[in-house]
Amino acid sequence: MAESNADLLCPLEFRYGRPEVRALFSRERRLRRALRVEAALAETQAELGMIPEPAAKAISKAAAGNAVTLESVDKLEAELRHDVMAIARALAAHSGAGGAWVHFGATSGDITDTALGLEFQEAVSVLREDLTELVRVLAKLAKSHRSTAEVGRTHGQQAVPISFGYKVAVGAAEVLRHRQRLDELTERLCVGKMAGAVGTGAGFGSRAAEVEAGTMKRLSLRADEAPTQIVGRDRIAEFTNWMALVAGTAERLATEVRNLQRTEIAEVQEPFDERRQVGSSTMAQKRNPMVSENVSSLARLVRAFALPPLENMVQWHERDLANSANERVVLPHAIVLTDDILRKLAVVYSGLQVDKARMAENLRLGEGSVMAENLMLALTARGVPRPEAHELLRTLTRSDASGESLASRAKKNAVLRSHFPGPELEELLRPDAYVRAAAAKTDRVVAWLERELKT
């Protein structure tokens, strides 16, 4: 393997992505899909009496066997300078007398876009499984930390207490929404066409609708309702933009780990192999969130891949080739990398080290000021107008206030003492009590997630 890697250009081939997912887009797999489409077309036409049945059988046998090779197709393409014609010629050469009927009535887009629909079927299955696994991991973590009190932060500042479980549950819900979106768009994405040069089906004569329907049925695909020479590119643009959305969520989840792993916060740490892993070539003490950073880096690339398919929606009349070259690059890369980042996130969150003691310590950093909202609301409930209650707490928590805790300052305040005598004030300033609502909401979210995962 090391020798074969020496001359590789694209990092996707040796550094990123799972081998089994990269294999979905190998030239061999793509050739086999195209041959499968040609065979389905011939079988359908024979069934309709449009071509001889022995011809269809010969074509199907040649398509399913190993006679048509990449080498033979490449040799023909070098001469013809047309990839689909090279496949059709190679298939015809191994189909005997039946070769005369290969690709009858079809155009290149019929083969390539229908084969692409088959490719999307496989890719969608992989990505849905990835999303399901990540939701499972996040739901489990959320449940285990449903009432683990942690500082909630807005604008990078301490806000009010949250539970770490609820923070994770929010992310899990977002991931599940992406699975729902994928289910919704799959029907629009996994389509093919067998409609000829400009999409009218004229080349198949009066049996055009039957040819397309029969071919798609054999391939378990839907037919594009109104194609041109190619399947509508809005379908692909929707898919790549969906992947961009997934990448946005992935980076958000990765960034949360990166921020919470900061030395100054240190509430979580992504998995780190203490026996062997190196954090820095010079700073031996480093335990960097490298996987989360890798997810962030690759997620930005996936989002960038969303733009070319949007541009590809603009075709000259019934088709041009301006989409063809970039799709060969964009689709495998976007899909392989989306799978990669989802798998890596599942590893990070399944092995996440959560420091509950540090979370509690950080809650104390503000000397109890994170509980100001609770005290303000309690005051309002006791009859103090909300603006007055807000101003009172704003004053007590001013940055120029003394280093005393909020509890100490509150006990000295006449208004607060009059409304909350004795231990009641202490109870209102307890973060663990304030996260009970977060724990309850986490339970509701996790219950919903678990129901949805059964579908």
Image (tube, rainbow, N blue to C red):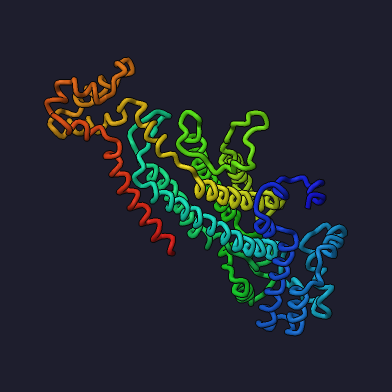
Residue 266 x, y percent position in the rendering:
47, 33
Q: Which residue is rendered at x = 83% and y = 75% of the image?
A: 94
Q: Nearer the viewer, residue 167 or 189?
A: 167
Q: Position of residue 391 (x, y in %)?
A: 23, 22
Image coordinates of residue 336 in percent, x first then y, are: 63, 52
Task: Please determine whether, in this image, residue 57 is positioned above or below residue 138.
Answer: below
**Residue 209 quadrant:** bottom right
* Identity of the residue furthest to the front in this view: 275
Could you tell me which residue is drawn at 32 percent across and 18 percent down? 403
- Of the 4 image quadrants, the one containing the C terminus is bottom left
Number of numbered tags placed on the structure image: 0
Picture layout, residue 37 above or below residue 24: below
Residue 87 in picture, x, y percent from top left: 78, 66
Snapshot quadrant of residue 355: top left
Decide which of 242, 12 is in the foreground and name it.
12
Q: Is residue 198 left or right of residue 348?
A: right
Residue at x 67%, y 48% (from the top left corner): 16
Q: Is residue 228 visible?
A: no
In this orientation, which residue lies closer to the viewer: 117 or 205? 117
Could you tell whether 19 is left or right of 177 in the image? right
Determine if residue 332 is in view.
Answer: yes
Picture layout, residue 10 above or below residue 40? above
